[in-house]
Image (cartoon, helix red, strand yellow):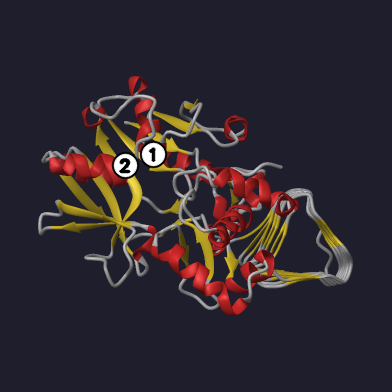
Amino acid sequence: MQAIILAGGMGTRLRPLTYTIPKPMLPVAGIPALAHIIHALEEADCREVLVTTNYLADVVSDGLKAQNFRIPVRCITEQKPLGTAGCVKNAIDQLDEEFLVIQGDAVSDMRYGEFIDFHHANNADVSIAVMRVQDTREFGIVAINEEQRIQRFQEKPRPEEAFSNLANSGFYLVKRSVFDSVPKDEPYDFSRQLFPRLMSEGARFFAWEFRGYWVDIGRVQNYLDGNLHLIKGKAEIAPGVHIPESATLVPPFLVGEGTHIGASCVIGPGAIIASGCVLGAGTNVSGSVLHQNVWIGQAARLNDCVVAAHSRLGDSVSVEPMSIIGESCDIGSNTQVCAHSRVGPVTPVAPGTVVDGVVSPRLDKLESLQRTMSLAPAYKDLPHDQLIVCALLAVSGEMTARSIAASAEIPFSRVHSVLTPLESRGVILSTLDVPKRYALTGDDVRTTS
């Protein structure tokens, strides 16, 4: 069995992390998310893996070469974004009569052997692994009969409009022949185009319900959850780590090679610290992911957050839950990074600053981005204030209504009158928690450095 993994997306909702690292290559429990998928395919006796790339393609290719896989792994670069089905069609001459298609940005306990057996038992043209979800707005939904045959699809419905809570998890097993009518070198989508067309033609569609762990790491909460899932029950310290007796380590945790932990630090529970990090005396890190070569001063507090590689945080810095510090940032001492804020990449923050929202050099280029977005089909007819909001979300990934109002200079009393029509049109979506956070629905908005 071959597998093709789709790894060309831009991961806009995880910015600023994904300005420098494509989402499938973000480290999860110490290795790229994509590597976890390939290792699982090795265990399922997959004979070869093809990886489709577009955004930051060299980072994906070089990163995979550094991994020690037991099976051949080849990257195929799209010269332009071709959509989920289009990028598979682009590689169809290199694929067998039957193959797996996998989204490259999830953490899961997927049981590929059972999925393959189900597909063959039903003589399916297409089998889809489905999961039960509470919020249907970010998923394609399927309705099935008693034989688990799919009767119809519904793309990202509101919960009150959904006819099912069985969500497409992005794992497919397909016959090569289903791509015969997919156009070559043109954008084409599985959920919006290929699956509905095949359904209308009477193709044999089946849904296999997967009951294990699965999460798309495309939001900061999900990224943290995926990391924590993979270190559950672990207390791992790599070689060359300095830990003084006065430090306290609370499982689960993972500490990478060559990291230096200062006196009286508290690490964990749920700390994932990559190689080459330095933590000053009295620093506390819990529920957080630190990428490689992060330097943190004394008495810092990091809770449920992400700090990207090569960033420096001064003494007594506080980083609150669901915040992201991008790559190579310099956060001055006594800075408070409030919950759900985002900084970077390559951004200095003066000592004593309170960061509440987004701090990014790309915000300086917002006017240029608005002009670019106004030409795209999804955004070209938007009123000016709605276009500003979409441009902000393209830069930051996710923002609260209050942060949007402050950054767009829209009175907070009026910001929801801007957000509501965007959400009704499906241009943006919001989280269910409080405060709500808003993000672009699409994942294809490029911004420049």
In front of the other: 142 or 359 = 359
In front of the other: 407 or 163 = 407
Instruction: Name the quadrant containing residue 87.
Output: top left
Instruction: Name the quadrant containing residue 330.
Output: bottom right
Q: CA distance from mark 1 to mark 2?
A: 6 Å
Instruction: Please give the residue where the numbered disc 1 appears in the rendered image.
Output: 84
The answer, for residue 160, to whether it is visible in the render is yes
Amino acid type, residue under disc 1 in the picture: Thr
The answer to whether marks 1 and 2 mark residues whose Cβ atoms lie closer than 8 Å is yes
Instruction: Please provide percent x and percent y for residue 23.
Output: 56, 46
Above or below for 222 versus 26? below
Name the residue rendered at 26%, 36% in the picture. 174
Above or below for 100 versus 161? above
User: Looking at the rendering, in which quadrant would you find the N terminus?
Assistant: top left
Instruction: Please give the residue where the numbered disc 2 appears in the rendered image.
Output: 190
- Residue 349 horizontal side relative to residue 433, left or right: right
